[in-house]
Structure formats: structure tokens, C-alpha cells
Image (spheres, helix red, strand yellow):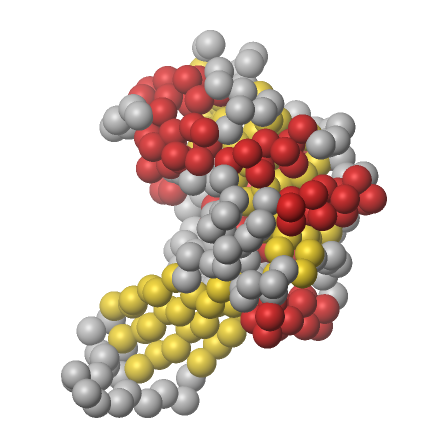
Amino acid sequence: MILTVTLNPAVDHTIQVESLPAPDTVARTDTAQFDAGGKGINVSQNLSALGAETLATGLVGDFLGDYITRALRAEGLDFEFVDIDGQTRLNTTILDSENEVEYKINHTGPTVDAGAIAAVIEILIEHDPSMVLVAGSLPPGLDSHAIDRIAEAGPWETVADVGGERLAQLDADYALCKPNRPELEAATGQSIDSLDDCIAAAHQLRSTGFDRVVTSLGSEGALLVGADETLHAEALAVDVVDTVGAGDAMVSGVLLELARGNDARRALQRGVAVASRMVTVPGTKLPAVDDLDDLTAQVEITTYEQ
């Protein structure tokens, strides 16, 4: 089982207006969308769609936390969250149709006592997963030690998909991390202007406690750096509609294959294939994946000497 941990989930609130209101006026809309959000939750949703055994956990509170659990129950996703006293955050996106721009307002999240991590760890121990993904931001009151505690609490392999500065603060040993290019720069302090720069920075980050570093590079594909191999995957030629959720989709494909015992090459190919399928539709819900094996086989891999 792959268990995902989202310590700072959110209800994603998206509204569309013809244009932003002038000061002291009211804009009205009849379109609003609410989604259970958070990187770990997104990955569990993807893994479930791909046929993998997964369970989502993390911290939820108050009526917005209740909304997340109701939404996930309605879609049939397995979950077991820890209830906290604070209120789960609300992230709002305003789509301005007239000017074709969007505005994002994200809450920082509730203040959480470090004791909540002990309750999360109890859930992990109870379910005994082979792999644990800790993903997304941390709420106030928690620091990088919370992620290290999860990594060190059991025999599972731990994967970190967090911000670059947060990656640089982790002290435990991790099976894998998945920064994008800006996060890799933030984690290493290196300027990345080429694929060679990316490879060098990934090696530097790997040496700080990560067995493998997978870096998503958008239209340039993805990179996987391990102790014995450096692999670059070309992006597939698809019609890109929306890149939201592409990184979570890539993580899902990579973890799926590694959990099945397949090699890094296959994992990287699958990650790129799943991400390529995700960007062809708006939103973060993975579309039909009937042709995923064919897409995976089409991903070209170049191996670089260490």
C-alpha cells in the first residue's frame, strides 16, 4: 500500500466573474466549484484511478475538514484523517473572464500542535504501508522535524514532495523527493539554466539524504538521478490544456511503478505518461487511462554517465 500524508489540506474554491468589481461595488457569479485539495490527497486520487492500493491521511478540522471527508467518501477514496481543533484552510481562485487572468488567495492553515504528528504516525503503523508520501505545505506550528519524524517512525520508504527550502531542511533518509526546477534551485542554492545544471543540482540534493531525486521539467520532460543512474525522459507531444496537477500526476506514476518493484526507467516513463495524460484536461482529476501502457512505451529515455 502507498499511504499519502497531507498535513495542510485545503478546500479549493474556484469562482468565475466577468471582471473584478470596482471598489465598494459587488461582483456576482453563478459559477462556483469546491474541491478537496492537497498534494497528498491528489496523489491518492490518482493512484486509486490507476488501480493501486492507497490510503490518504493527514490533518482536518471544522466544517471545511468535514467537507473534505464527505467529498472523498462520495468518490470512494479510502482515507483516515486526524481531527484537529483548528479549521482546515480555504484556497480561493478567482477567474477574471474579461481580462483572462486568475487570482489566487491561499490560507496559511490552522496552527497545529506537534502532538498531532503522533496520531498520524499511529495511523501509519496500523496500516503498515510499503511506501509513505509526505506532500505539500506545513501548517503553522509544524516544522521540518514533523516530516523527519514520519520518515523515521517505521520501516516504510518515505517520499517527500515539499517545497525546495523545506527539502534542504530535512535530516532523515528518504527514498525519493520530487522537486520541480524552481524547487531544485531553492533546495540547492544553484542557478539552473540547462539540463546539465539540473543534473548537477539533483546529484547535490541526492547526497543530502535522498536515494533518488525526480525533477519535473515541464515541456523538457523529467529527470531521475539515483546512486547508479541518471535518466532523462522526453516529454510527450500532447495538447496541453491545464498544467495544474501535472506534478502530482508524475509522482503518482513514479510511485506506482516503484511500489510494484519495477526499475527506475519504467517508473520515470510511467510518471511522464501519467502527467502527459493529466495536462490534456482542466483540473486535477485524472482522465481515462486506457491507453496508458501505450503512452508509457512512447516515452523516450536517455541514460547519462554518472
**Residue 243 appears at what percent x and percent y?**
41, 54
**Residue 137 appears at what percent x and percent y?**
48, 48
Residue 1 seen: no
Q: Residue at x 29, y 24 (%)?
A: 190
**Residue sitting farthest toward the top:** 306
**Residue 152 appears at what percent x and percent y?**
67, 28
From this view, report whether residue 149 is shown above or below residue 17.
Answer: above
From this view, report whether residue 30 is shown above or below residue 9.
Answer: below
| Viewer-proximal residue among 230 and 289 | 230
Q: Residue at x 47, y 58 (%)?
A: 109
| Residue 296 horizontal side relative to residue 306, left or right | right
Q: Count the marks: how many?
A: 0
| Residue 126 horizontal side relative to residue 167, left or right | right
**Residue 261 appears at what percent x and percent y?**
73, 29
| Residue 137 horizontal side relative to residue 67, left or right | left
Q: In the rendered image, which quarter is residue 255 located in?
A: top right
Residue 162 seen: yes
Q: In which quarter of the image is the N terminus?
A: top right
Q: In the rendered image, which quarter is residue 150 located in?
A: top right
From this view, report whether residue 241 is shown above or below residue 147.
Answer: below
| Viewer-proximal residue among 186 and 107 | 107
| Viewer-proximal residue among 107 and 248 | 107
| Residue 199 horizontal side relative to residue 2, left or right | left
Q: Residue at x 41, y 89 (%)?
A: 30
Q: Residue at x 65, y 49 (%)?
A: 116
Q: In the rendered image, which quarter is residue 282 located in?
A: bottom left
